[in-house]
Amino acid sequence: MDLITKESAHHDAKDAHHDHHEPMPFWRKYIFATDHKIIGYQYMFTSFFFLLFGFGLVMLMRWQLAYPGKPLPILGNLIASVLGEGSMPGGVMVPEFYNALGAMHGTIMIFLGIVPLAFAAFGNFCIPLQVGSPDMAFPKINAASYWSYFVGGILMLVSFWAPGGAAQSGWTSYTPLAVIAPTGQTLWIVGMVFLITSSLLGAINFISTIIQCRCAGMTWMRLPYLMWAMLVTSFLLVLAFPPLEAAGIMQLMDRVAGTSFFLPEGLVVSAKSDVIAGYARSGGGATLLWQHLFWFLGHPEVYVLILPAMGIVAEVIAANARRPIWGYRALVFSTLTIGFLSFIVWAHHMYMTGMGQRMSVFFQTTTVLISVPSVLLLTCLILSLWGGSIRFTTSMLFAVGFLPMFGIGGLTGLPLAFNAIDLFLHDTYYVIGHFHYVVAPGTIFALFAGIYHWYPKATGRKMDETLGKLHFVGSFICMNLIFTPMMIQGMQGVSRRLYDGGATYGLAQPTLHWNIVMSMAAWTLGLFQIPFLINFFLSMKRGEKASDNPWEATTLEWTTTTPPPHGNWPKLPTVYRSAYEYSVPGAAKDFTPQSEP
Amino acid sequence: MSDSVESVKHHVRSYIIIGTLLIVLTGVTVGVSYIKFEHSTNIVVALIIATFKAALVASIFMHLFWDMFIKMAVIFKVMIFTAVFFAGMMALTLWSLKDPIGHSQQIGPMFPHQAKTHVEHHEP
Amino acid sequence: MDIPYTVQERPDTGLYNAKVGIWLFLASEVMLFGGLFSTYIVLRVGSMDWMPGRDFGLSVPIGTFNTAVLILSSVTMVMAWAQLKFNNLRMFKFFMGLTILCGLMFLCVKSYEYNDKFHHQHYPGAHTFYAIYFTLTGLHGLHVLGGMIVNSFLFGRAACVSLVTVALTALYVGIVGPLHGVATAEGAVFMSVFAWLGIIGLPVLIVILARLLWKNNHSMEMWKNDPERFTNRVEVSGLFWHFVDLVWIFLFPVLYLL
C-alpha cells in the first residue's frame, strides 16, 4: 500500500545521513539536550532550586510576621550585605523589602516552581513514555522551552539587585501601583515574557505529542488519566497565557514608553512617571483592564497548578491500591468540563472592584458551577481506595494525604465564590489559607508522591522508605499548623500583605499569637525537607535496587528498561488494554500491563 | 502528502483569484469607510468585510476549505472553539459595559418576576 | 529513533505533527492579539476624545498600500509552497524571494509611518490611541519580521544571514533611536541595557549564525534528502505568514478607518 512504501522510502532517505550510533558530546547530551527525559530532569532540578528559594523567601517573611520590627540575628545582616542596606538595615526588614519578598515568593513558587515541576518536568518525563512515543513531537522546541524558562528564572533572580528592589506590587502586579514601582518590576515583566514563552512552547509540544504520537492501539479512552490531565492543562496554558502576555507588554509600555494603558488622567504620582521628552502622560487609561487580563490567565493558572497533581495522584493510587481508578470516564469528562469552565470564572477575583449586578451574578454562577466537576474529581479519587488492597509506600502516603488536604482547600474556596461572603473575606488571610491548602499540602504533596513513584524508573533505585515517611509525617503536620491558623486569622478579618502581620490593627489582636505558631511551623517544615533532599541524592548511589517495574504497575513506562534509553523502546509497543487493569477477576496476575495482548 | 500534485494545480488558480478579490475588497473597505453611516453601523460594516476577508484567507490560503470537507481536521475544531471563545470574551465585555453600580433599578429588573410594585421602606 | 508522523499524516487526524503544532501556536496568537484588541475596545469606549485614525494623523493611502503588499505576499507565499509540490525549486525561490521582499517593503513603509508620527510629536504617550496603535502595529511588525527571518532561512543561507544581519541591525537602530526621546526615566535605563545587549550581542549572534549556516545549507540539503519534509516546513511557515496577514486585515480598518 502507498503508506508503507512511502514510510520505507522515508526511512531509507533518513537513514542515509542519520547515524544513530554517533556518540553526542557532553554539552549536546546533557546541556542542550533534546531527549525528553533529560529535559524533564533539567526542569526538575531547576524547579527544586526555585521551590527552595521561594520557600526561603517566605521563611524570611515569617520572621517579620512573628516578631515585627525585630532584627533577624545573623541572617539579617547577611542579607543586608548581599542585597544592600535597602533591604534589611541592621537586620530589620523594611516594608518595601517585605513586599518584594511577598511578590517574589508568589511569582517564584507559581511560575518558577510548581508549573515547571508539575507540568513541565512530569509532563516531559511521563508523556512520551505513557503514550508510547520515542520522544516529544518537537524535541528541539522542547529544549528551547527549557532554556526560555531558565532565562526567565535568571531575570527574576537578578531583579533582587535592581535599584529599588525586586517587584513589590504583589505577584498580581496590579496597576497603577506596578507602573510606578521600582525597576525590579520591569525585570519581572520581561522575565514573565520568557516564562510565558516557555510554557506556550511546552504546552504546544505536549498537545501535539498526545494527539499525534500515541502508539498503535492507544485509543483516547485507554490513555492513563495523567495524560488527559496534561492535555487539558496544556490547552489552558495555550489559550490563557497570551492575554497576560499582552497585558505585560502594555504594562511594560506604560513603564518605559510613557503610555497610559492603565493610568487614569491626572494621576501624577511622581516625577518618575513623567516622560523625558517633556510632556505629561495622556491619561485616559483603564486601570481595571489590567485586572481583567491578569485574572483571565490567573484563574486557568490555578487549574494548571492542580490538574497535573490530580493526574499524578490517580496514577499512584491505582498502582498502590491494586484496583482500577473509580470512574475513569467521569474523571475525563470532569477534567474537560473544568478546562472549559475555568475560562469563564475569572472575575471572582475581582468582586471588590465595584462590579455591577450583571457581572457578579454571571461569575458567581459559573464559579459555583465549576466546583461540581472539581468535587467529582476528588470523589472519584477517594472512591478509588474503596475495596483496594492498599500498600502504604511513601508515594501512596503523599497521594492519600493529598486527598483531604485538597478537600479542605477546595471546600474553603466555596464560600469565596459568593460575592456577599467575599465582601468580608477578600484579601484576608482566609484567602491565603484557602489557596495554600490547595497548592501546598495539595499539589506539592502530589508532586512528592510522583517523585517517590517514578524515581525507580529514572534511576533504577528506590528512595529510602524511612526517610520518606519522616518527610511525610513532618510535612503533613507542619503544613496544617501553618495554614489552619490562617483561616482563623482571616475570619477574624486580618488583611493579607500587611508587613507587620496585623500588629497595629485592633481587630487582629485576638489572633496575633497565631503568627508565632505559623512561623515556627514554617521553619520546622523547612527542616523536614532536609530528609527529602538527603534521600533524593543519596538514594541515587545507595538506594535499594529496583526492577524495571517495582510497583507492578500497568502503564507503558514500566515496560521499558531502566532508565529508559534514547527512543524509549527498541520497538514501539502496541496497546491492547485500558490503563488500569488491576485485580481483574480471572486474570493470571493482579495486574496486566497495557501492552500485553 | 496532504494533496496530490493535480489538486494543487487546481488550487493555484483559486489562489490568484482570491488574492485579487482580497485587494478589491480592501478597496471596498476603504471606500465604504468614507460613507457617513451612523457611527456604529460603520464599525459593523467594516468588521463584516474584514471577517469575510479573513475567512477567505483562512479557508483558501490556509487550506481549511479543503481540509474541512475532506478530513474534518482537528484544526478546524480547535479554530471553531477559539472563535467561539473570542466572541464570548468580546460579548461579555460589551454586555458588562451597561452594568453601572447602584443604577440597576433604573435599567430595570434582571428577570420579569422581579418587576414588583414599589414597596414602602420603613425607617427603624 | 524516528518520531512518528513528522512527515506522514496520521490517519485519524489527517495531519502531520508540525501542522498540529502551528495551529495551536496560531490559536495562542489569536488570544494574544485578542487581548490587545479588547484593550482597544475598552480604551475607545472609555475615551472622551477618540477620533477616526485618519484624524490622528494616520495616512489611509499608505495603509491601503501596505494592506495590498501583505495580501500580495500571502499569494506569493502559497505559490512558493505550490511550486515545491510541482518539484520546481527555481520557481519556489522566485516566489519565496518575492514574499520576503514584500515583507521588507511592508516594514519599510511602517518605519516611514512611525518616523512621520514622531516627527509630528505623536508619541505613544501622547494619547491612548497612539499607545494602542504603536503597540498593536509594533507587535504585528515584530511578527512580520519573525516570519521573514524564518522564510529567509527556508530560502537559503546567504539570504538568511544577510537578512538577519540587516533586519536586526535596522530594528535595533530603529528602536533605540526614536524611542530614546520618548522613554521615561525608567525607560532610559531599559534602553541603555538594551543598547549594550545589542552592541555586544548582535555581532556575536551574527557570527554564530554565519558559522552555523556556512557549514551546511540546511534548507537545500533537506530539499535534496527529504523533499516532503522541507515542503511541509514551507507549508507551516506559510500558515504563520497567512495569519500575520489575517491580523493586519483586522488591524487596518480598526486603526486607520474607524
Image (cartoon, coloured by chain):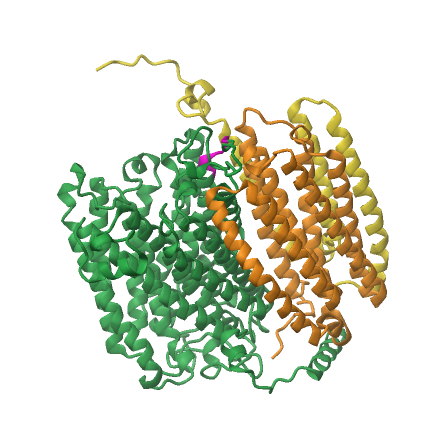
Chain colours: A green, B yellow, C orange
Residue at 60% across, 47% down: C177
**Where is the C terminus of chain C found, in terms of image quarters?**
top right
Q: Quadrant of residue A7?
A: bottom right
Residue A345 inside the magenta-drawn segment: no
Q: Is residue A543 left or right of residue C208?
A: left
Query: Of A2 and C194, which appears nearest the observer?
Result: C194
Whole-percent x, y for residue A272 in the image: 43, 39
Query: Of A346 and C116, which appears nearest the observer?
Result: C116
Residue A286 inside the magenta-drawn segment: yes
Q: Quadrant of residue A386?
A: bottom left
Whole-percent x, y for residue C216 in the image: 70, 75
Q: How many marks?
A: 0
Query: The magenta stretch spans which residues?
Result: A283-289
- Regarding residue A432, the answer to whether it shows in the image is yes
Query: Of B88 and B118, which appears nearest the observer?
Result: B88
- Regarding residue C146, the answer to whether it shows in the image is no
Whole-percent x, y for residue C86 in the image: 84, 65
**Where is the N terminus of chain C found, in terms of image quarters?**
bottom right
Whole-percent x, y for residue A512 in the image: 15, 46
Q: Quadrant of residue C232?
A: bottom right
Residue at 62% across, 70% down: C208
Query: Of A217 and C170, which appears nearest the observer?
Result: C170
Q: Is residue A483 left or right of residue A185?
A: left
